[in-house]
Image (tube, grey):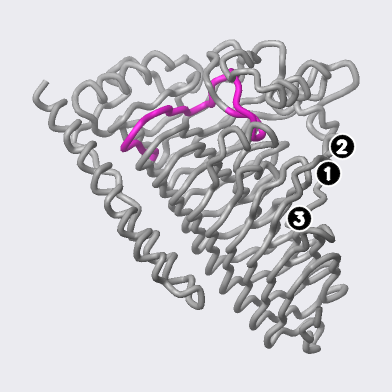
Amino acid sequence: MIVNKIIAFKTVLISGVAALLISSCAKQTAKVSDANPWKKMELIIKSIPQTQFPDKTFNIKDFGAVADGKTSNTIAFEKAIKACAGNGGGRVLVPNGKYLTGPIHLESNVNLHLEDNAEILFSINPKEYPMVHTSWEGTELMNYSPLIYARNKTNVAITGKGTLNGQADATNWWIWSGGKDYGWKKGIPSQNDPENREVLIEMAEKGIPVEERIFGEGRYLRPNFIEFFECNTVLVKDITVINAPFWILHPIKTNNIIIDGVTVNSHGPNNDGCDPEYSQNVLIKNCTFNTGDDCIAIKSGRDADGRRVAIPSKNIIVQNCKMIDGHGGVVMGSEISAGVNNVFVENCVMDSPNLDRAIRIKTNSKRGGVVEDVYVRNLEVGTVKECVLRVTMFYNVYGSQTGNFIPTVRNINLENITVKNGGKYGVWAEGYEESPVENITLKNVKIAKVGKPYLLKNVKNINFINTNANEKKVETIKN
């Protein structure tokens, strides 16, 4: 009891100190000149609190776990996590070996730690995943539990050099996508059936409460892999994630999260590497993303649901990462209705003939939202298929995507970028006549080979400073 009170006090103290630091940082940030936004980034990093855990270990084998890759260890994980949390927190150890399990639900003050040769194999049986309050493509609902899930937790981590294996492939979760490349054939149920995805979107548009948006069995909406929902002070470090059913790292309404040294290698449908949503103070560093969709996609809710929640994603920092395959290296959107601001990307390598764009912003007049203050520097781009920077207010997928919520996109800055093969365009940007894309700056950008330097429609104030494409200087366009 005393130990629990001490940990509770420490947790409150950490949160209180973090709040003071964030408040102080906000005041300092306000004083930082827009001429040097990278100082703002440094203050944000300093404000993010670190996880801290007691030096106590709870080995899952002591709670009945069997490392044969066949025996279900769901109960062993549950017991170990509850014992750890109940005794003031610490480390839940996953020793070397293969462990089959259903979903893992984390608690405050728990560090789930995988030894180097430990592998957690997640069940592909949907019946093992209970319904929880979660989110699917930017819309909240009651659906299958994520494979690893924490809700309303503080001081929580997943660490170690082991592997999390979702075991998804074209015979199970991926087939639900309705994609022919992922095992689907005509007559097989999928998320695209009229009573599934579209019904969820309609419920949100009508304002139906989340607890009444009941999906799960028979609705074919795949679960996220790792989701921190309404959490604070989170660490994900060094793990490898493979074969995900859907989105991979999904902090939603979560503040103060560090994702460090993580490797994501998963090429399934909608296999985004990391999707911070309605989240603030997010540091993603030293990671490798090799994905079937966007490597990093910053979100803030879809359409009416995003406007209902109305929490922008902000203070998102990406450092020293490697992007291989994917639809985009660092992306904002398309579920972006509550807006995104203060995004910093630096010192990254992006290179693959299967990487479509380096930096991408995508929204439309159903999404709306304000995207502003995006700063990118020191990128080494080998090959991208389409373009280096893509900005569109006309993103259109899954049918009609037009409405009355005209987006705003402004203040996009790229500096010190080298590109070997930029694809079709260096910059491809398009806005509305009444809401043009505003204030794009490319400084010290060198694109050795590209189809055309730019393709622009309704863009206001785009500046090329010491920027070359195809060995020719790109001149600033006078509006």
In this view, the residue in front, 193 or 237, is 193
Q: Quadrant of the N terminus?
A: top left
Task: Please tell me which residue is depicted at 62% across the width and 48% down the height of the picture.
Answer: 297
Q: Cα distance, mark 1 to mark 2?
A: 7 Å
In this figure, which residue is indicated by the disc labeled 1?
396
In this figure, which residue is indicated by the disc labeled 3?
354
Residue 154 percent coordinates (x, y):
33, 35
In this view, the residue in front, 87 or 76, is 87
Q: Cα distance, mark 1 to mark 3?
A: 21 Å
Which residues lie in the magenta part? 135-158
Q: Are marks 1 and 2 in contact (CB under 8 Å)?
A: yes
Q: Amino acid at mark 3?
A: Asn
Task: Please tell me which residue is depicted at 43% across the width and 67% down the height of the picture.
Answer: 40
Q: Is residue 183 above or below residue 302?
A: above
Labelled disc at residue 271: none
Residue 322 percent coordinates (x, y):
57, 60
Q: Is residue 392 left or right of residue 235?
A: right
Q: Check if residue 414 falls in the magenta segment.
A: no
Q: Find numbered disc 3 in the image and state the secondary structure of the residue it sits on.
A: loop
Label 1 CA crowd tier, 10 Å (few <14, some 14–19, many 20+): some
Earlier in the chain: of badge 2 and badge 3, it is 3
